[in-house]
Image (cartoon, rainbow, N blue to C red):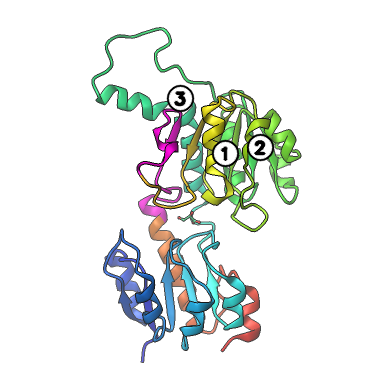
Amino acid sequence: MKPLVYVTRKLPEEIIVRLQENYEIDMWSKAEVQVPREILLEKVKKADALLTVISDRLDEELFSKGENLKVVANMAVGYDNVDLDAASKYGIAICNTPDVLTDTTADLAFALLLATARRMVEAAEFVKNGEWKSWSPMLLAGTDVHHKTIGIVGMGKIGTVVAKRAAGFDMEIIYHNRRRHEVAEEMLGARYCSMDELLEEADFVVCLAPLTEETKGMFQREQFQKMKKDAIFINASRGPIVNEEALYDALQAGEIAAAGLDVFNEEPIGANHPLLALTNVVALPHIGSATKETRIAMMETCCDNLDAIFADRTPRTLVNKDFLSSRH
Ligand code: DGY
Protein backbone atom coordinates (compact mmCIF):
# COMPACT_ATOMS: atom_id res chain seq x y z
CA MET A 1 0.00 0.00 0.00
CA LYS A 2 1.22 3.51 -0.82
CA PRO A 3 1.81 5.87 2.11
CA LEU A 4 -0.99 8.39 2.62
CA VAL A 5 -0.03 12.06 2.30
CA TYR A 6 -2.48 14.70 3.51
CA VAL A 7 -1.93 18.00 1.65
CA THR A 8 -3.31 21.05 3.46
CA ARG A 9 -3.80 23.32 0.42
CA LYS A 10 -4.90 22.61 -3.12
CA LEU A 11 -1.70 22.31 -5.14
CA PRO A 12 -1.20 22.50 -8.92
CA GLU A 13 -1.92 19.41 -10.98
CA GLU A 14 1.72 18.80 -11.96
CA ILE A 15 2.67 18.40 -8.28
CA ILE A 16 -0.26 16.12 -7.56
CA VAL A 17 0.66 13.95 -10.55
CA ARG A 18 4.19 13.63 -9.19
CA LEU A 19 2.98 12.80 -5.68
CA GLN A 20 0.51 10.22 -6.96
CA GLU A 21 3.36 8.15 -8.41
CA ASN A 22 4.40 7.15 -4.91
CA TYR A 23 1.60 8.13 -2.56
CA GLU A 24 -2.06 8.04 -1.96
CA ILE A 25 -3.15 11.68 -1.79
CA ASP A 26 -5.84 13.29 0.27
CA MET A 27 -5.96 17.07 -0.24
CA TRP A 28 -7.88 20.02 1.18
CA SER A 29 -9.93 21.30 -1.74
CA LYS A 30 -9.08 25.01 -1.51
CA ALA A 31 -5.94 26.92 -2.46
CA GLU A 32 -6.79 30.18 -0.73
CA VAL A 33 -8.66 29.02 2.34
CA GLN A 34 -6.90 27.35 5.23
CA VAL A 35 -7.94 23.84 6.20
CA PRO A 36 -9.99 24.13 9.42
CA ARG A 37 -8.09 22.92 12.47
CA GLU A 38 -10.66 20.24 13.32
CA ILE A 39 -10.36 18.73 9.84
CA LEU A 40 -6.56 18.70 10.04
CA LEU A 41 -6.75 17.03 13.46
CA GLU A 42 -8.98 14.35 11.94
CA LYS A 43 -6.89 13.87 8.80
CA VAL A 44 -3.62 13.47 10.68
CA LYS A 45 -4.95 10.35 12.39
CA LYS A 46 -4.55 8.32 9.20
CA ALA A 47 -1.76 10.20 7.42
CA ASP A 48 1.78 8.87 7.00
CA ALA A 49 2.91 12.34 5.94
CA LEU A 50 1.65 15.90 5.82
CA LEU A 51 2.44 18.52 3.21
CA THR A 52 1.70 21.80 4.97
CA VAL A 53 1.96 25.57 4.62
CA ILE A 54 3.09 28.29 7.00
CA SER A 55 -0.42 29.06 8.30
CA ASP A 56 -0.95 25.51 9.59
CA ARG A 57 -0.19 25.19 13.30
CA LEU A 58 1.84 22.04 13.82
CA ASP A 59 1.96 21.37 17.52
CA GLU A 60 1.97 18.59 20.09
CA GLU A 61 -1.82 18.18 19.92
CA LEU A 62 -1.55 17.45 16.21
CA PHE A 63 1.54 15.22 16.42
CA SER A 64 0.05 13.18 19.25
CA LYS A 65 -2.85 12.19 16.99
CA GLY A 66 -0.63 11.18 14.08
CA GLU A 67 -0.12 7.53 14.90
CA ASN A 68 1.46 6.78 11.52
CA LEU A 69 2.90 10.24 10.92
CA LYS A 70 6.54 10.09 9.88
CA VAL A 71 7.20 13.38 8.17
CA VAL A 72 5.89 16.89 7.67
CA ALA A 73 7.06 18.71 4.55
CA ASN A 74 6.37 22.36 5.37
CA MET A 75 6.30 24.55 2.26
CA ALA A 76 8.35 27.44 3.65
CA VAL A 77 11.86 28.21 4.75
CA GLY A 78 10.56 29.51 8.09
CA TYR A 79 9.22 26.95 10.54
CA ASP A 80 7.93 29.10 13.37
CA ASN A 81 4.55 27.37 12.87
CA VAL A 82 6.09 24.07 14.03
CA ASP A 83 6.80 22.86 17.55
CA LEU A 84 10.09 21.16 16.73
CA ASP A 85 10.58 19.64 20.17
CA ALA A 86 7.17 18.01 20.03
CA ALA A 87 7.89 16.71 16.51
CA SER A 88 11.16 15.15 17.64
CA LYS A 89 9.48 13.68 20.72
CA TYR A 90 7.07 11.83 18.42
CA GLY A 91 9.86 10.87 15.98
CA ILE A 92 8.42 13.02 13.19
CA ALA A 93 10.76 14.57 10.66
CA ILE A 94 10.17 18.24 9.87
CA CYS A 95 11.46 19.51 6.54
CA ASN A 96 11.46 23.03 5.11
CA THR A 97 12.21 24.59 1.71
CA PRO A 98 15.33 26.77 1.93
CA ASP A 99 17.64 27.74 -0.96
CA VAL A 100 15.10 27.53 -3.79
CA LEU A 101 13.43 30.73 -2.56
CA THR A 102 16.49 32.75 -1.57
CA ASP A 103 16.85 34.90 -4.71
CA THR A 104 13.12 35.34 -5.18
CA THR A 105 12.54 36.48 -1.61
CA ALA A 106 15.54 38.80 -1.77
CA ASP A 107 14.13 40.29 -4.99
CA LEU A 108 10.83 40.99 -3.25
CA ALA A 109 12.49 42.50 -0.19
CA PHE A 110 14.53 44.82 -2.36
CA ALA A 111 11.54 45.62 -4.59
CA LEU A 112 9.58 46.53 -1.45
CA LEU A 113 12.41 48.79 -0.37
CA LEU A 114 12.42 50.51 -3.76
CA ALA A 115 8.62 50.74 -3.91
CA THR A 116 8.48 52.30 -0.44
CA ALA A 117 11.34 54.72 -1.04
CA ARG A 118 10.03 55.83 -4.42
CA ARG A 119 6.34 55.80 -3.39
CA MET A 120 5.52 53.55 -6.31
CA VAL A 121 2.22 52.14 -5.02
CA GLU A 122 0.93 55.61 -4.15
CA ALA A 123 2.07 56.88 -7.55
CA ALA A 124 0.44 54.04 -9.48
CA GLU A 125 -2.85 54.62 -7.67
CA PHE A 126 -2.54 58.35 -8.36
CA VAL A 127 -2.40 57.67 -12.10
CA LYS A 128 -5.19 55.09 -12.09
CA ASN A 129 -7.44 57.39 -10.05
CA GLY A 130 -7.09 60.09 -12.71
CA GLU A 131 -5.40 62.47 -10.28
CA TRP A 132 -2.40 63.21 -12.54
CA LYS A 133 -3.05 66.70 -13.89
CA SER A 134 0.40 67.98 -14.69
CA TRP A 135 4.13 67.39 -14.26
CA SER A 136 5.06 69.10 -11.06
CA PRO A 137 8.45 69.79 -9.47
CA MET A 138 7.95 67.81 -6.27
CA LEU A 139 5.13 65.53 -7.35
CA LEU A 140 5.35 62.24 -5.45
CA ALA A 141 9.00 62.88 -4.71
CA GLY A 142 10.41 59.96 -2.81
CA THR A 143 13.84 59.33 -1.41
CA ASP A 144 17.01 58.04 -3.07
CA VAL A 145 18.11 54.46 -2.55
CA HIS A 146 21.48 54.52 -4.31
CA HIS A 147 24.50 55.50 -2.22
CA LYS A 148 22.48 55.24 1.00
CA THR A 149 23.10 52.90 3.92
CA ILE A 150 21.16 49.67 4.22
CA GLY A 151 21.03 47.99 7.63
CA ILE A 152 20.20 44.31 7.37
CA VAL A 153 18.90 42.66 10.52
CA GLY A 154 19.39 38.92 10.01
CA MET A 155 22.24 38.18 7.65
CA GLY A 156 21.26 34.66 6.61
CA LYS A 157 21.00 33.41 3.05
CA ILE A 158 18.26 35.87 2.07
CA GLY A 159 19.98 38.74 3.88
CA THR A 160 23.20 38.06 2.00
CA VAL A 161 21.45 38.15 -1.35
CA VAL A 162 19.65 41.37 -0.39
CA ALA A 163 23.10 42.77 0.41
CA LYS A 164 24.23 41.72 -3.06
CA ARG A 165 21.30 43.62 -4.58
CA ALA A 166 22.21 46.64 -2.39
CA ALA A 167 25.83 46.52 -3.57
CA GLY A 168 24.54 46.95 -7.12
CA PHE A 169 22.88 50.17 -5.97
CA ASP A 170 26.18 51.42 -4.53
CA MET A 171 24.79 51.24 -1.02
CA GLU A 172 26.84 51.03 2.11
CA ILE A 173 25.95 47.75 3.79
CA ILE A 174 25.82 47.29 7.54
CA TYR A 175 24.31 44.31 9.29
CA HIS A 176 23.43 42.80 12.62
CA ASN A 177 23.27 39.07 13.12
CA ARG A 178 23.77 36.41 15.79
CA ARG A 179 27.08 35.56 14.11
CA ARG A 180 29.52 37.47 11.95
CA HIS A 181 29.17 36.71 8.26
CA GLU A 182 32.72 36.69 6.89
CA VAL A 183 31.67 35.99 3.30
CA ALA A 184 29.34 39.00 3.20
CA GLU A 185 32.05 41.11 4.78
CA GLU A 186 34.74 40.04 2.31
CA MET A 187 32.69 39.81 -0.88
CA LEU A 188 30.26 42.68 -0.37
CA GLY A 189 32.08 44.92 2.07
CA ALA A 190 29.30 44.49 4.62
CA ARG A 191 30.15 45.87 8.05
CA TYR A 192 28.99 44.15 11.21
CA CYS A 193 27.59 46.41 13.91
CA SER A 194 25.55 46.33 17.08
CA MET A 195 21.79 46.62 16.78
CA ASP A 196 21.86 50.16 18.19
CA GLU A 197 24.56 51.27 15.74
CA LEU A 198 22.58 49.78 12.88
CA LEU A 199 19.39 51.55 13.94
CA GLU A 200 21.20 54.86 14.26
CA GLU A 201 23.16 54.66 11.00
CA ALA A 202 20.89 52.94 8.47
CA ASP A 203 18.72 54.83 6.01
CA PHE A 204 16.89 51.56 5.34
CA VAL A 205 16.43 49.06 8.14
CA VAL A 206 15.55 45.72 6.58
CA CYS A 207 14.32 42.93 8.84
CA LEU A 208 15.06 39.44 7.55
CA ALA A 209 15.58 37.61 10.83
CA PRO A 210 13.67 34.40 11.54
CA LEU A 211 10.95 34.48 14.19
CA THR A 212 12.30 32.96 17.39
CA GLU A 213 11.86 33.58 21.12
CA GLU A 214 14.78 36.05 20.85
CA THR A 215 13.47 38.00 17.85
CA LYS A 216 9.78 38.14 18.84
CA GLY A 217 8.88 41.77 19.52
CA MET A 218 12.42 42.89 18.64
CA PHE A 219 11.16 46.16 17.09
CA GLN A 220 9.44 48.27 19.74
CA ARG A 221 8.90 52.03 19.90
CA GLU A 222 12.39 52.40 21.38
CA GLN A 223 13.97 50.80 18.29
CA PHE A 224 12.03 53.06 15.94
CA GLN A 225 12.99 56.09 18.01
CA LYS A 226 16.65 55.21 17.57
CA MET A 227 16.31 55.28 13.79
CA LYS A 228 16.86 58.36 11.66
CA LYS A 229 13.74 60.48 11.14
CA ASP A 230 13.90 59.82 7.41
CA ALA A 231 14.64 56.09 7.81
CA ILE A 232 12.52 53.51 6.03
CA PHE A 233 11.68 50.25 7.74
CA ILE A 234 11.18 47.07 5.69
CA ASN A 235 9.92 43.77 7.09
CA ALA A 236 10.02 40.71 4.85
CA SER A 237 10.48 38.03 7.52
CA ARG A 238 7.71 37.55 10.09
CA GLY A 239 5.14 39.98 11.51
CA PRO A 240 5.50 39.18 15.22
CA ILE A 241 9.09 40.46 15.19
CA VAL A 242 7.53 43.91 15.14
CA ASN A 243 5.21 45.56 17.63
CA GLU A 244 2.75 46.93 15.08
CA GLU A 245 1.25 49.45 17.48
CA ALA A 246 4.73 50.84 18.13
CA LEU A 247 5.39 50.99 14.39
CA TYR A 248 2.11 52.82 13.80
CA ASP A 249 2.88 55.33 16.56
CA ALA A 250 6.41 55.88 15.25
CA LEU A 251 5.09 56.53 11.73
CA GLN A 252 2.37 58.83 13.02
CA ALA A 253 4.81 60.77 15.17
CA GLY A 254 7.24 61.16 12.26
CA GLU A 255 9.96 59.22 14.08
CA ILE A 256 10.58 57.27 10.87
CA ALA A 257 9.55 58.12 7.33
CA ALA A 258 7.85 55.04 5.94
CA ALA A 259 7.48 51.28 6.13
CA GLY A 260 7.26 48.47 3.59
CA LEU A 261 5.66 45.37 5.06
CA ASP A 262 5.21 41.94 3.50
CA VAL A 263 4.31 40.27 6.79
CA PHE A 264 2.02 41.03 9.70
CA ASN A 265 1.17 39.92 13.20
CA GLU A 266 -2.06 38.43 11.99
CA GLU A 267 -2.31 37.22 8.45
CA PRO A 268 -4.35 38.12 6.56
CA ILE A 269 -4.26 41.59 8.11
CA GLY A 270 -7.74 43.11 8.47
CA ALA A 271 -8.57 45.76 5.87
CA ASN A 272 -9.35 48.21 8.68
CA HIS A 273 -5.98 47.80 10.42
CA PRO A 274 -4.65 51.30 11.28
CA LEU A 275 -1.33 50.69 9.48
CA LEU A 276 -3.17 50.30 6.18
CA ALA A 277 -4.65 53.78 6.46
CA LEU A 278 -1.19 55.37 6.30
CA THR A 279 -0.05 56.53 2.86
CA ASN A 280 3.58 55.96 3.86
CA VAL A 281 2.98 52.24 4.41
CA VAL A 282 3.35 49.81 1.52
CA ALA A 283 1.63 46.56 2.45
CA LEU A 284 1.90 43.26 0.61
CA PRO A 285 0.19 39.92 1.34
CA HIS A 286 3.23 37.81 2.37
CA ILE A 287 4.45 37.22 -1.18
CA GLY A 288 8.21 37.05 -0.61
CA SER A 289 8.64 33.73 -2.37
CA ALA A 290 5.64 34.07 -4.66
CA THR A 291 6.79 33.53 -8.21
CA LYS A 292 5.48 30.63 -10.25
CA GLU A 293 8.96 29.16 -10.63
CA THR A 294 9.83 29.39 -6.97
CA ARG A 295 6.53 28.16 -5.59
CA ILE A 296 6.77 25.09 -7.85
CA ALA A 297 10.39 24.58 -6.74
CA MET A 298 9.24 24.76 -3.10
CA MET A 299 6.60 22.12 -3.76
CA GLU A 300 9.17 19.94 -5.54
CA THR A 301 11.44 20.27 -2.51
CA CYS A 302 8.56 19.06 -0.33
CA CYS A 303 8.12 16.05 -2.66
CA ASP A 304 11.87 15.31 -2.55
CA ASN A 305 11.79 15.38 1.25
CA LEU A 306 8.82 13.00 1.41
CA ASP A 307 10.56 10.67 -1.04
CA ALA A 308 13.72 10.66 1.08
CA ILE A 309 11.87 9.70 4.26
CA PHE A 310 9.94 6.89 2.62
CA ALA A 311 13.14 5.59 0.98
CA ASP A 312 14.87 5.67 4.37
CA ARG A 313 17.23 8.43 3.33
CA THR A 314 17.91 11.64 5.24
CA PRO A 315 15.97 14.49 3.61
CA ARG A 316 18.17 17.24 2.21
CA THR A 317 16.39 19.96 4.14
CA LEU A 318 15.58 18.26 7.40
CA VAL A 319 15.09 20.78 10.21
CA ASN A 320 14.95 18.67 13.39
CA LYS A 321 18.08 16.59 12.94
CA ASP A 322 17.39 14.91 16.29
CA PHE A 323 14.26 13.19 14.97
CA LEU A 324 16.55 10.40 13.70
CA SER A 325 17.32 9.27 17.22
CA SER A 326 13.66 8.62 17.94
CA ARG A 327 12.55 7.61 14.45
CA HIS A 328 9.68 5.12 14.39
C1 DGY B 1 8.80 31.21 4.03
O1 DGY B 1 9.22 30.46 3.17
O2 DGY B 1 9.12 31.12 5.22
C2 DGY B 1 7.82 32.23 3.60
O3 DGY B 1 7.69 33.26 4.48
C3 DGY B 1 6.47 31.55 3.36
O4 DGY B 1 6.23 31.66 2.01
Q: On the rendered image, what quadrant is the N terminus found in?
A: bottom left
Q: On the rendered image, what quadrant is the C terminus found in?
A: bottom right
**Residue mark closest to the camera, 2 vs 1:** 1
Range drawn in magenta:
271-294
Q: Is residue 238 visible?
A: no
**Which residue is nearer to you in this view: 67 or 300?**
67
State if disc 3 and disc 1 touch (CB < 8 Å): no
Helix, strand or loop at label 2? It is helix
Please state which amino acid type lies under the numbered disc 3. Arg
**Residue mark closest to the camera, 3 vs 2:** 2
- Which mark is on residue 246? 1
Magenta-span inclusion, residue 272:
yes
Bin the neighbour count of mark 1 within 10 Å (Cα to Cα): few under 14, some 14-19, many 20 and up.
Answer: some
Please state which amino acid type lies under the numbered disc 1. Ala
Relative to 258, is 196 on the left or the right?
Answer: right
Residue furthest top in the image: 137
The residue to which callout 2 is attached is: 223
Magenta-span inclusion, residue 284:
yes
Helix, strand or loop at label 1? It is helix
Residue 48's x, y, as percent? 43, 84
* Alpha carbons under labels 2 and 1: distance apart: 9 Å
Label whose residue precedes the other's in the sequence (3 or 2): 3
